[in-house]
C-alpha cells in the first residue's frame, strides 16, 4: 500500500473538518465544499483565465467507435459511441425559481462525441471491493490515521492538535445534528448535518459499531479517489471520464432531465434511491431505503446500467473546474489539466456524479443527468462510491 505520502497535503481538509467539529465548531471554520452534500451556486464567479485548464490537442473528427470490438467483460455492458449534448443551457436568471437546483457549472450545453466503451453495470459492491482487498491487502485512505506533521502550515501551532483527533475516519451524515439551531439560509448549510466519524471506513460505513454484514451487494462507500484508481487498476479497468459518465447516464436518450425521462416519479414510481422529506430534519423512507440500497434495486437505464442516478455518488476521473464546458474539446474530453474550485481554490478536487440517497430537491439534485459535483480527492464519505470502465484501447483485439 503506497498512499501514505498523499496524506501530507490532501488529507488535511478532512481531518481539519473533523477537528473543527470537535474543537472550534463548524460555523467558525466554514469550509464550503468538502463533500458532495454541499452546493455552491456561485461556483463559476471568479475562475482564473479559462484557458488555464485547457488541453491542447488536434480534434479527432473520425466517426466514433460504435461496434463492440471484443466479448463483453463480465459484469459490464457495451456503451456504443456517439454524439450527445452534455450539460444544460437552462440556468434560471437571478431571482427566478430554480426548483431543480441547476448550477452554473452545468452550462453551457455542448456537443460531445464519445468512443464506445464498456461500463460496470452496477456501482462497485462491497463484495467486489472485499475481493480486491483480500487479494492485495490494500488499505484504504480512511483507514490510515493522519500524522501531526500533516498540519504544518495549516494550523499555526501543530502542538495544539489534540492527540485524540489524529484518528482515521470518514464523513458521515450526523443523525444527531443540532435541530434547535439548524439554519438553512446560507451556502453549504448542509454541513450542519455532517460529522467526521472516527473509525468509519468501507467495512464500517457509519463508524466502528457498524458493518457491511448483510450488505455485500450494496455499493462500497467511504473510498477516496485514489482508492478507486487502485481498485479499477486491479480489475484491469479505469475510472470513467466525466463525459463518458454523463453519456452513459443518459442511456441513449437526448435532452432528458433524468436517465428515465423528465418526470421524477413516473406513475408515482420511485426510479432512484434518494431522500424523501425535507433534508435533513424530515427523513422519510418512501423509496424503501434510508441509506444505501443493494445495487439493481431500481430500474436500469437505456443502456442497462443501474443506479447511475442515486444510491451513491460516483467518482469520475476528471479534475473539477466550474467553467470547463466553455472550452472542453468535442471528442472524448478528459477534463481540465488542473483542479479549480473558486470556493476552495487550494484543494484538489475531482468530479463526482449521480447523487446519492441523501439528495432531494431542497439539498442537491445530483440524480439529474447534467448535475455536477466535486469532492476533495481525500474526502471519504459514506454516500460516495464508484464504478469502472474499459475502453477499446485496453483490450487485445
Ligand atoms: Ca432513499
Ligand atoms: Ca450511483
Image (cartoon, rainbow, N blue to C red):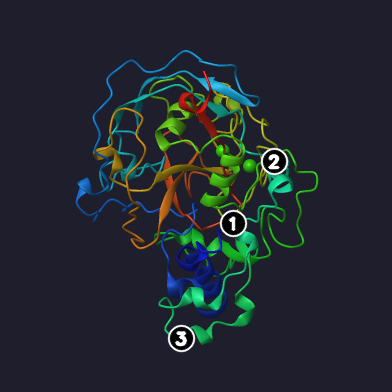
Give the secondary structure at mark 1: loop
The residue mark sitting in front, 1 or 2, is: 2
Around disc 2, counting alpha carbons within 10 Å, would you say few (fewer than 14), some (14 to 19), or many (20 or more)? many
Residue hosting label 3: 157
The residue mark sitting in front, 2 or 3, is: 3
Q: Position of residue 36 (x, y in %)?
A: 49, 52
Residue hosting label 2: 218
Mark yes or no: residue 287 visible: yes
Q: Quadrant of ligand 2?
A: top right
| Residue in the picture at 42% in, 76% down | 154
User: Can you say whether 65 is above or below 188 in the image?
Assistant: above
Residue hosting label 1: 281
User: Can you say whether 267 is above or below 157 in the image?
Assistant: above
Q: Is mark 1 within 8 Å of ligand 1?
A: no
**Residue reaching furthest right?**
214
Give the secondary structure at mark 3: loop
Q: Earlier in the sequence, mark 2 or mark 3?
A: 3
Q: Earlier in the sequence, mark 1 or mark 2?
A: 2
**Residue reaching furthest front?**
396
Question: Label 3, label 1: how many angstroms apart (C-alpha)?
Answer: 37 Å
Amino acid at each position: 500500500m503506497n498512499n501514505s505520502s498523499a496524506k501530507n497535503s490532501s488529507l488535511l481538509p478532512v481531518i481539519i473538518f473533523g477537528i473543527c467539529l470537535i474543537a472550534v465548531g463548524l460555523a467558525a471554520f466554514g469550509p464550503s465544499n468538502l463533500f458532495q452534500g454541499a452546493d455552491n451556486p456561485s461556483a463559476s464567479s471568479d475562475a482564473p483565465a479559462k484557458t488555464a485548464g485547457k488541453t491542447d490537442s488536434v480534434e479527432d473528427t473520425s466517426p466514433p467507435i460504435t461496434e463492440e470490438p471484443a466479448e463483453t467483460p463480465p459484469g459490464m455492458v457495451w456503451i456504443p459511441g456517439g454524439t450527445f449534448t452534455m450539460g444544460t443551457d437552462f440556468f434560471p436568471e437571478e431571482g427566478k425559481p430554480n426548483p431543480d437546483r441547476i448550477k452554473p457549472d452545468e452550462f453551457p450545453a455542448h456537443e460531445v462525441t464519445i468512443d464506445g466503451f464498456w461500463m460496470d453495470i452496477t456501482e462497485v459492491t462491497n463484495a467486489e471491493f472485499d475481493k480486491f482487498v483480500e487479494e492485495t491487502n490494500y488499505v484504504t485512505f480512511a483507514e490510515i490515521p493522519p500524522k501531526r506533521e500533516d498540519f504544518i502550515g495549516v494550523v499555526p501551532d501543530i502542538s495544539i492538535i489534540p492527540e485524540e483527533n489524529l484518528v482515521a475516519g470518514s464523513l458521515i451524515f450526523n443523525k444527531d445534528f443540532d435541530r434547535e439551531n439548524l439554519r438553512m439560509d446560507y451556502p453549504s448549510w448542509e454541513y450542519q448535518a455532517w460529522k467526521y466519524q472516527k473509525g468509519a471506513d468501507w467495512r464500517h460505513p457509519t463508524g466502528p459499531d457498524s458493518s457491511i454484514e448483510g450488505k455485500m451487494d450494496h455499493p462500497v462507500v467511504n473510498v477516496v479517489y485514489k482508492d478507486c484508481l487502485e481498485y479499477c487498476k486491479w480489475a484491469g479497468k479505469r475510472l470513467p471520464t466525466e463525459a463518458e459518465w454523463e453519456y452513459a447516464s443518459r442511456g441513449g436518450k437526448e435532452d432528458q432531465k433524468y436517465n428515465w425521462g423528465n418526470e421524477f416519479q413516473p406513475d408515482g414510481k420511485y426510479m432512484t434511491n434518494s431522500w424523501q422529506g425535507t433534508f435533513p430534519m424530515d427523513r422519510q423512507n418512501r423509496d424503501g431505503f434510508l441509506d444505501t440500497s443493494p445495487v439493481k434495486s431500481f430500474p436500469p437505464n437505456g443502456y442497462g446500467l443501474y443506479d447511475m442516478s442515486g444510491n451513491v455518488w460516483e467518482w469520475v476521473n476528471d479534475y473539477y473546474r466550474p467553467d470547463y464546458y466553455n472550452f472542453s474539446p468535442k471528442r472524448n474530453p478528459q477534463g481540465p489539466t488542473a483542479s479549480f474550485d473558486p470556493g476552495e481554490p487550494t484543494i484538489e478536487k475531482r468530479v463526482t456524479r449521480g447523487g446519492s440517497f441523501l439528495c432531494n430537491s431542497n439539498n442537491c439534485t445530483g440524480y439529474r443527468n447534467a448535475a455536477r459535483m466535486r469532492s476533495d480527492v481525500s474526502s471519504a464519505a459514506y454516500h460516495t462510491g464508484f464504478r469502472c470502465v474499459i475502453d477499446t484501447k485496453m483490450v487485445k483485439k
